[in-house]
Amino acid sequence: MTGSRKRTAQRTAGPVVAPRHWSRLRRAVKWAFLVPAGAYVVFAFAIPIIYNIVLSFEQTSPATISHLTAPFAGLSNYTTTLKDPIADSAIIRTFSFTVLSLLFQFLIGFSLALLFNLRFPLRRFARSLILVPWLLPLLVTGTIFRFLFQLQGGAVNQILIDLHLIHEPVGYLLSPGWAYVTVLLTNIWIGVPFFTVLLYSALQDVPAELLEAARIDGAGPWQRLTRVTLPIIRPVIEVVFVLGFVFTVKVFDVVIGLTQGGPANSTQLIATWAYNLTFQNFDFGAGAALNTVLLLIALVAAPLYIWLNRETLHGESL
């Protein structure tokens, strides 16, 4: 009776998988999941980046670009591009544009995060409404602001005239200085929700006990903010600035939709001028060289992001 039970148990248990075979099977399954992701990275990121770098060292034209072969140009595309006054001003303008955008996006976003951290009527509705600028396509946002700031019939001019702040319409998009300010304000409006949401999430992690203890010890609102809140959420602030830098330094759609780089190239940024060189002047080598410069600038954020998240990444690897 006992022997028959053992034979029945062996038949129902099925074949026993050897540990080595099981280890190979698990490894094969892991690679099966990694292959599609790896293929996507190669075709969507690696190949375009490598091709752009190759183009930056070639003397290309519409005739050679279709054959994927062109004479080797060395560093001439880089030297010519960096000596171009428009490219130089675009690089400088990109840095000033990025710094000012991040500064005001943080100040406004952090203020809104502190506001939403309070309890007041319709707080949830206001939080959801603040996401609208982030959800709109950037090209659509640029077009909307172009209608708002246009000379004739623009809503901004009409409101300022009704408030008796100006006496005649201002050509915001026709003046180099005003056009730059308009693009800057538009980009700040777009980026505020990103800062607000992440900083608001960080504020939720500040222990209420610490704030209450600081209040009992006599700390005022400003002291509680600077001595308790900001030190706790500082890692999040650092990461938000790094990600905001990556998003801002490559701004393209907003400028194209709003000013197309004008007037007189006064709002050209690195990305927009590289686009003009490539698809309007058909100087593919110069455009690729400027894109490579933009890539190197953006890559600065990668090791900085890893360094700022070193503790989190170390904890995940354990």
Image (cartoon, rainbow, N blue to C red):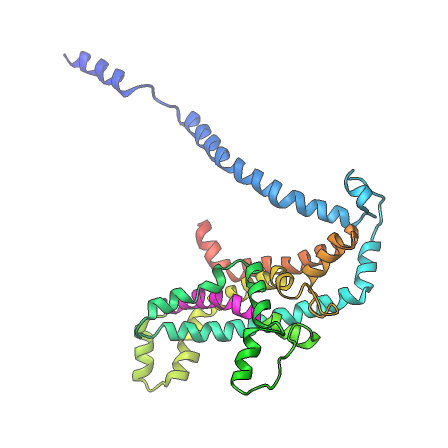
Between 145 and 191, the one lying in front of the other is 145
The one of 152 and 318 positioned closer to us in this rendering: 152
Q: Quadrant of residue 51?
A: top right
Residue in the foreground of this view, choosing between 266 and 232 = 266
Residue 155 position within the rendered picture, expressed as x and y whole percent measured from the top left = 54, 74
Q: Residue at x 34, y 67 (%)?
A: 124
Above or below: residue 33 compared with residue 202: above
Looking at the rendered structure, the number of numbered marks drawn on it comes to: 0
Quadrant location, the N terminus? top left
Q: Residue at x 72, y 60 (%)?
A: 273
Q: Is residue 108 left or right of residue 76?
A: left
Apparent side of residue 150 relative to residue 30 in the rendered image (left or right): right
The magenta segment is: 186-205
Residue extending furthest toward the front? 153
User: In the rendered image, which quarter is residue 300 located in?
Assistant: bottom right
- The spot of residue 68 in percent (x, y) is 77, 39
Left or right of residue 185, residue 64 in this image: right
- Residue 181 at x, y percent in the picture: 62, 75
Toward which corner of the image does residue 170 lie, by quadrant?
Answer: bottom right
Asked if residue 107 shows in the view, the reply is yes
Identify the main secondary structure in magenta.
helix
Which residue is found at the position 67% from the left and 56% from the top? 295
Residue 187 painted magenta: yes
Q: Position of residue 144 (x, y in %)?
A: 55, 65
Does the magenta run of residues contain 191?
yes
Q: Is residue 235 visible?
A: no
Does 272 appear above or below 165? above
